[in-house]
Image: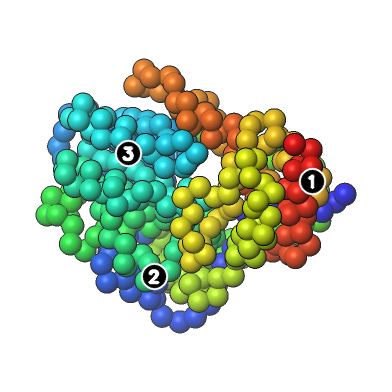
Amino acid sequence: MFYLQSPVGNRTVIHATQKGRAGFDALRHWKASWFASGTAALSAAVKTAVVARKIEHPEVLLPAYGCPDLVAAIRHAGAKPYFVDLSPDSFRMNSLTVAEVIDNRPSVVALIGVDLFGCPENWTELYALCRANDIVAIRDCAQSLQSREKIDRELDADFLVYSFGRGKPLYLQGGGAMLRRSDAPNELAAAQVEVEAPHEIRDGWYSRAKNELYNALLEPHLYAVMARLLGKRLGVTRYEPLEKIERAPLEFAELANPALEGFWRNHRSRQNELMAMLSAIKSQLAGLVKVAPNYPGPKQILLRLPLLLRDRSMRDELQAAMLNAGISATTMYGQPLPFINGVGCEQGMRSFPMAEDIAGRLLTLPLHERITDRDLMAMKNGLLNMRTRY
């Protein structure tokens, strides 16, 4: 059947939808800097911590499950990644392990927590640990773009980092942003990070044509053909070193800020309908599926809907059933971050049991703007059919 909904499918924003900057520039408690990518923005935040703390052989804590771009950003900033395992049945780092590592490793200068799929980390506890130990807290929001009010209200990190590349909540053909607290300590505010000037202009017919094509290929029938042609090469997780920290072109803010305003005003997700549907069959799925661990409620915007199945075989069976129904249900990174080819684990510890458990049971369902009522019903039926077999 040549029908397949992509895992993420929000259209790219090619033109500003309204006049005026606003967006991140209108935040009261954060100052925005724009970069060529989310990875560059993250590396700039880490580099700021490295420069400010002036510690020899600096280390940065990060979760043992996540995107390899986290490691690329840390290494380019001149630090070493130190992986922390997750809490059971959660995408959050184990805070007890975080506290233990901080006590035993005086070279830790920063902690990166990830709001994976839009599900927030335990920032109240993590930020308290960071402040008590003079560690810079960096909140990776690449998969989480909440309302302006929520961003300005939750002051539980020193830096927020956003990405606007493919597959992100707001796709702006690339680019990223680093938000630093307006009341940052003097050493963070004064830290000078070497950043390269942008080397290309974003506008032009080629850029517009490329992104119009991208938007067109997300149509389910065309995406099904592309997926059939590319096979396993589509969406493969790879580690790629970051070559430089580069600013975004000056006109990027002229696109990004109005686009942010449009996203906050017009964003429509199917997550509430799907969550309501899953809630109605929750009792039938008990013991088989855990839906969106650490999901705080309907006001939290999710990029994808994460499911934790009982075991790997059940996960693989449900994925096959979803794909057969035209739904790109993905296993995301497939393995713990230290085990992804090219990443490596410099700290010597090779066991991350909770991250391995999550990687083996995780399945994500799409929630983007193209999802139809037919797709929601296919997801529901796939889960109910699984229940009859177990």
Q: Which residue is mark 2?
A: 148
Quadrant (top left/top right/bottom left/bottom right) for the C terminus: top right
Residue visible at 59% across and 31% down in the picture: 360
Residue visible at 42% across and 36% down in the picture: 87
* Residue 115 pos. (x, y %): 43, 50
Task: Give left or right: position of 24 versus 206.
Answer: left
Give the Cα distance between marks 2 and 1: 40 Å
Which structural element holds mark 3? helix
The image quadrant of residue 232 is: top right
Q: Which residue is mark 3?
A: 95
Q: Which residue is mark 1?
A: 385
* Residue 24 pos. (x, y %): 36, 68
Residue 321 visible to an observer of this rendering: no
Identify which residue, 185 or 326, lies in the foreground: 326
Task: Give left or right: position of 108 versus 114.
Answer: left
Q: Nearer the viewer, mark 1 or mark 3?
A: 1
The answer to which of marks 1 and 3 sits earlier in the sequence is 3
Instruction: Give the amino acid at mark 1.
Output: Asn
Which structural element holds mark 1? helix
The answer to which of marks 3 and 2 sits earlier in the sequence is 3
Which structural element holds mark 2? helix
Give the total number of marks visible in the rendering: 3
Residue visible at 50% across and 39% down in the picture: 89
What crowding class fits label 2: few (fewer than 14 Cα within 10 Å), some (14-19), or many (20 or more)? some
Identify which residue, 244 or 73, lies in the foreground: 73
